[in-house]
Structure formats: structure tokens, C-alpha cells
Amino acid sequence: MKTIGVLTSGGDAPGMNAAIRAVVRAGIYNNLKVIGIERGYDGLINGKIKEMDLSSVADIIHRGGTILKTARCEEFKTEEGRKKALNVLNVFGIDGLVVIGGDGSFMGAQKLSQSGIQTIGIPGTIDNDLGYTDYTIGFDTAINTVLESISKLRDTSTSHGRANVIEVMGRHCGDIALYTGLAGGAESIIVPEVDFETGDVCEKLIRGKTRGKLHSIIMLAEGIGNAFELGKEIEGKTGIETKVTVLGHIQRGGNPTAFDRVFASKMGARAVELLLDGKSGRALGIHNNKIIDIDIHEALSKKKRFDEDMYRLAKILSI
Ligand code: ADP
């Protein structure tokens, strides 16, 4: 192994830069040439590559986004597209590749590994929707961003005696809503993994108001109906003025938290170790506070487990 490549793909996540930095620095420390591939698989197909040195990753550990940029690339899903990518890898002598991204990016990484390129996946997505790892890079930063917004909305809601529906990201995964709902003291948490009745949400709001509560927070994971319609329905049923906030892409930016930086740094360095050990088709993650690596196929087939206990706890504490 002489030359390795690194790319970020799919949706960006705070902490990706810390992972890139770790791959580059650990690679150079181990006398490898490290190539940065821009804009994910699209850049790989089109040869958008540059050699990285120690200073090309200076001053980035604390920055959100990804200095390598990211993209979605339909062409890479085709045999033809992947042939072009393999050709570029060949031409530049890249014999190991680190892919930082979500489940879609991992599917691409798996295919490259099957074609004989040593490939390692690092989970980078704010959604925390991968079943094999307890956390993904960016999730911790995203939930802290959401918490900051909850605090701000709480201030103004208290002044006016309002309820708030706050829609957060996560695609099919309710983790962002669950963690921020518990940490932010939300009255209700609505996630795709658990059935809900608007009637129950309203009853709780009315109970709270009767007890003299000045504000209420309802965390809503994206993808389960329309936040604005829900807000209207709640207001209609309870008579409590209800504001709706869709936090959107603000959740994808910002300086990564210490957890995300440390986690990303550890995985970036481990990815290089795995490549040096001749490993391929492995996905890195964290389980019970330990960095783990498992077969990428197995990683993709593991169903994400929703933390029912945490959900129950949040319900008990917001009684
Ligand atoms: P994420 O990695 O955040 O889940 P996507 O699902 O958009 O994001 O996937 C990112 C990219 O990974 C896609 O644009 C495509 O280039 C590649 N990809 C996704 N699925 C496959 C697949 N089945 N085979 C090959 N490449 C894939």
C-alpha cells in the first residue's frame, strides 16, 4: 500500500473535516501518499483529485462542512460509471480508499471493494440512521444545534404562553427528535418509529396549561406529515396558540462538538490502520464506547434499533 484516497459523499455532516484530517495525517505519518477526491463519487469519476499534505488539513478540525465538498452521483450507481471510477483509481495508483458518508455512500464503497479496491467506510451523517453503530459523525453536533434553538424558542414561547411544534431532520430515523426531545424537556416527541395520536398530544398540552405551564414543546421528526398542518390542528383542538418552526439545514452546519471531533479523528486514523493491515469492505463505528469495524455488507443489513427505553423515559419525565 503506497497511495490512499479519501472522499466525502452524500449529505454533509459536521465532523467530516476532522475525519479527513485524521486520514491525511495518519496516512502521511505512515509514509503513505494521500489523495483527496473532491465532490464524492462524481469527483472520482471525473478525476477531481489533489494530493494532500500536512498543511492542506490545517485549521479544519473545528469547521463544519467538508473541505473536499460532497455530491450525489447517479452515474456511480451504474456499471459504466464505476468502470470510469476504477480507471481513475488505477491511473493515479490509488490502492486504498476511505469513504466518509451515509448508507448510500457505503453501498458505493461496498461495490468498489467487490471490484478489488481496498475500501473502508466512515459513517458521516447527522441522521444517526445506521443500525450497526451507536453514533454517526455529525449527530452530536446536530442535536446540540437543535437544543440551542429549543432554548431560544422556549424563551419567547414563555413570554407569550405559546406552544411550539419544532420539526427536525433525520429522514426515517427519529433519533434527532428523540434525543433533543429528552434533553430539551419536550412535552411530546413524534417519531416515525412510534404511532401517535394528535389527541394525546393535545390532552397533554391542556393538562400542562391547567397546571400553569407557560409554554410547550412538541418535537416532530421530519417525514411524518406536515408540521404546519399539525400546528393548526393542535391550535384548533386546544385553543393554545401554536407556532411552527422547521429547523431545516441549520442542523447540518456549525462547528463540530468535541465528541464528533474525537470520534471522527479516531475513525479516520483507524481507517488508515485497516488499509495498512490489508483490510477491505469494512465499516467503522462506535459501540459501547469502543471504535469497531464490521463487514460493510453486514453493517448495511443491520436494522436501526429505536431506543424504546429512552422514548419511554422522555414520556415519563414530561408527564
Ligand atoms: P448518503 O451517503 O448520505 O446516504 P446517498 O444515499 O445520496 O447519500 O448516496 C450518496 C452517493 O452514493 C450516491 O449519490 C451514489 O453516488 C452512491 N450510491 C448510493 N447508492 C448506491 C448503490 N446502490 N450503488 C452504488 N453507489 C451508490
Image: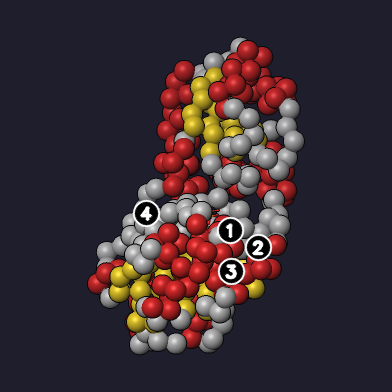
Circle 1 sits in a helix, a strand or a loop, which is it? helix
Residue 261, located in which quarter of the rendered image? bottom left
Q: Report how far apart the C-alphas of labels 2 and 1 lie in the structure.
A: 7 Å
Q: In which quarter of the image is residue 249?
A: top left
Any atom of ligand 1 within 8 Å of the CB at mark 4? Answer: no
Residue shown at the point (44%, 20%) measured from the top left: 159
- Circle number at residue 300: 2
Mark 3 lies on residue: 111
Query: Within 10 Å of the Cα at label 2, are there few (<14), some (14-19), or many (20+) other Cα atoms?
Result: some
The residue under label 1 is 103
Q: Quick one: label 3, few (<14), some, or many (20+) residues within 10 Å?
A: some
Camera-nearest residue between 193 and 39: 39
Residue type at mark 3?
A: Lys
Residue 269 placement, left or right of 255: right
Above or below — where is 31 with respect to 167? below
Q: Do the residues labelled 3 and 1 touch (CB within 8 Å)?
A: no
For marks 2 and 1 on the same chain, the one whose residue lies earlier in the sequence:
1
Element on which disc 3 rests: helix
